[in-house]
């Protein structure tokens, strides 16, 4: 097994008392409904969000109390094609689309980042000829082409817009030893930092079939799960290098025991949780006949904790997450019904809940209520504004926690001249906003005001902004005069 560790994993694990918390909540999106649900561990419905789209394969809590979930705009395997952010009241504050039929789409999973950006799995299409030129054996290449993996980092810029500020393209990390006349030729076994384009030789239109993504802020690294390679990968966010891979040495021509079998939902165990720094994987076990939840120590490459039980088998989907109390919460997707349960480090179930299947449930998110949360209420929309005109509006900052909330405005659009009264404050506050419109007529501008907790940079919320300028009376008069003069001269102006 090859591991190239460029980081240090702490092996000292603090002791934790196992406890069942009454205010645990679970967020999930059944695949064949348009709704996302928030429940407690007794199954009581606490909130519900409706969309015009079926969900993607995951949903997440955001620090500001909103939720983020992919939206399904296509019927590709694991496909989504966009992302939506909802407030707790069900309002959509961000509705981003990344989809072009037969060309590219987001899929499976997303990862909200602390800076407000979003990492997303995406895939793009290459034709048969393009793939063969990259060095793949044409005998194992579908004649209709294949989909290759790309990670994109999206910075929300407005209610429906976003900029891709970083990307990782799998095509830049390939190797093959099939054809010395084609690209990427080399010795596969000498390059575990590259991906063998000929490894997954089943006729599958998705070469890698990545199905989950996670991010480690301290290490600035990204964790991917590749179902078809039966591996998890760690990618350096700063330069895109493949630093670490685990689960299937055969994928890079090294002797060793295969550990993963069409796994889903690989994630880092977070700080202040037992096993922090290790990774937790739902190992579906396709081909071996049973599923397991495996905790892997990255330094040694060993499975240091594993959970399974008789008849515990899910050939698709499913997820797991380590909690601060040491327990692990699991979403187990069976053929007819889904089951959520929580299991201790001693492998004892503390509760279990069956939920309707509705096509299956992949990733769930979990949190314990309490603490300070910035919640911003309102939006700013101005239409038919004259250039350089000053317009005004308001929004509210709400403290949804139990202690005092100290907040401040951290960011706002770089167009226009902005004034905020106040620009920082304590607890519930009405913020008065004024902006001088840009000196560009007949233009549409959008963006966000970002309000953050002064003592917790990961606790923030956004106010969406839209502003549209119009053509001024003087400009209209000048245009009319221009048209009139040219008509008199019998000159076409269309």
Image: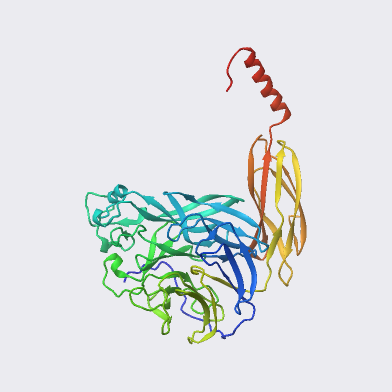
Q: Is residue 217 shown left or right of residue 430?
A: left
Instruction: Find residue 189 and report its horizontal and vertical position in percent.
Output: 26, 64
| Residue at x 65% of width, y 15% of height | 485
Q: Quadrant of the N terminus?
A: bottom left
Direction from residue 8 to residue 132 in the image, left or right: left
How many numbered tags mark residues here?
A: 0
Say which residue appears at 67% left-offset and 46% top-offset. Answer: 466
In the image, is 2 to the left or to the right of 55?
A: left
| Quadrant containing the C terminus in the rendered view | top right
How did the renderer colour the structure? rainbow
Please name the residue shown 52% across and 62% down the image. 111
Residue 193, how many percent across, how many down? 34, 61
Q: Quadrant of residue 263?
A: bottom left
Is residue 331 visible from the viewing direction of this image? no
**In the image, residue 473 lies at what x, y percent?**
73, 29
Residue closer to the observer: 105 or 272 = 105
Residue 144 x %, y %:
33, 51
Nearest the camera: 203 or 10?
A: 203
Most extreme residue toward the top, as rendered? 489
Residue 377 visible within the image: yes
Q: Nearer the viewer, residue 8 or 263?
A: 263
Q: Nearer the viewer, residue 117 or 94?
A: 94
Q: In the rendered view, does 450 fall on the left or right side of 336?
A: right
């Amino acid at each position: 097994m090859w591991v190239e560790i460029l980081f240090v994993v702490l092996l000292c694990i603090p002791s934790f008392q196992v406890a069942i918390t009454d205010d645990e909540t679970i967020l999930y999106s059944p695949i064949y409904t348009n709704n996302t649900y928030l429940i407690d561990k007794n199954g009581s419905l606490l909130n519900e969000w409706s969309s015009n789209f079926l969900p993607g394969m995951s949903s997440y809590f955001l620090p500001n109390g909103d939720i983020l979930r992919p939206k399904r705009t296509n019927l590709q395997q694991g496909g989504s094609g966009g992302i939506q952010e909802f407030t707790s009241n069900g309002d959509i504050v961000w509705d981003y689309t990344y989809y072009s039929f037969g060309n590219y789409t987001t899929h499976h999973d997303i990862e909200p980042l602390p800076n407000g950006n979003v990492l997303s799995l995406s895939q793009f299409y290459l034709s048969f000829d393009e793939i063969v030129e990259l060095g793949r054996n044409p005998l194992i290449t579908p004649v209709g082409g294949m989909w290759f993996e790309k990670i994109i980092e999206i910075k929300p810029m407005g209610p429906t817009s976003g900029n891709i500020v970083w990307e990782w393209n799998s095509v830049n990390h390939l190797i093959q030893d099939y054809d010395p006349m084609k690209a990427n030729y080399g010795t596969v076994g000498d390059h575990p930092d590259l991906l063998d384009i000929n490894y997954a030789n089943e006729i599958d239109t998705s070469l890698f079939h990545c199905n989950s993504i996670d991010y480690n802020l301290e290490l600035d690294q990204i964790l991917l799960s590749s179902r078809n390679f039966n591996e998890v990968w760690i990618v350096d966010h700063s330069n895109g290098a493949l630093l670490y891979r685990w689960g299937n040495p055969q994928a890079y021509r090294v002797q060793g025991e295969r550990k993963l079998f069409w796994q889903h939902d690989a994630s880092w165990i977070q700080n202040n949780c037992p096993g922090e720094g290790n990774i937790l994987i739902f190992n579906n076990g396709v081909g071996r006949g049973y599923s397991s939840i495996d905790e892997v120590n990255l330094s040694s490459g060993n499975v240091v904790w594993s959970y399974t039980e008789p008849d515990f088998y899910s050939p698709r989907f499913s997820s797991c997450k380590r909690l601060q109390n040491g327990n692990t919460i699991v979403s187990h997707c069976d053929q007819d019904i889904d089951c959520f349960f929580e299991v201790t480090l001693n492998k004892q179930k503390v509760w279990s809940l069956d939920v309707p299947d509705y096509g299956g449930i992949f990733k769930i998110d979990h949190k314990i209520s309490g603490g300070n949360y910035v919640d911003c209420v309102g939006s700013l929309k101005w239409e038919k504004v004259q250039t350089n005109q000053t317009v005004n509006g308001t929004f509210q900052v709400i403290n949804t926690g139990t202690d005092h909330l100290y907040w401040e405005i951290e960011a706002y659009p770089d167009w226009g001249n902005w004034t905020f009264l106040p620009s920082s404050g304590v607890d519930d506050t009405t913020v008065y906003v004024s902006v001088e419109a840009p000196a560009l007529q007949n233009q549409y501008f959008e963006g966000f005001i970002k309000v953050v907790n002064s003592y917790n940079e990961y606790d923030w919320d956004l106010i969406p902004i839209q502003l549209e300028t119009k053509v001024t009376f003087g400009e209209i008069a000048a245009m009319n005069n221009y048209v009139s003069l040219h008509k008199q001269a019998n000159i076409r102006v269309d």
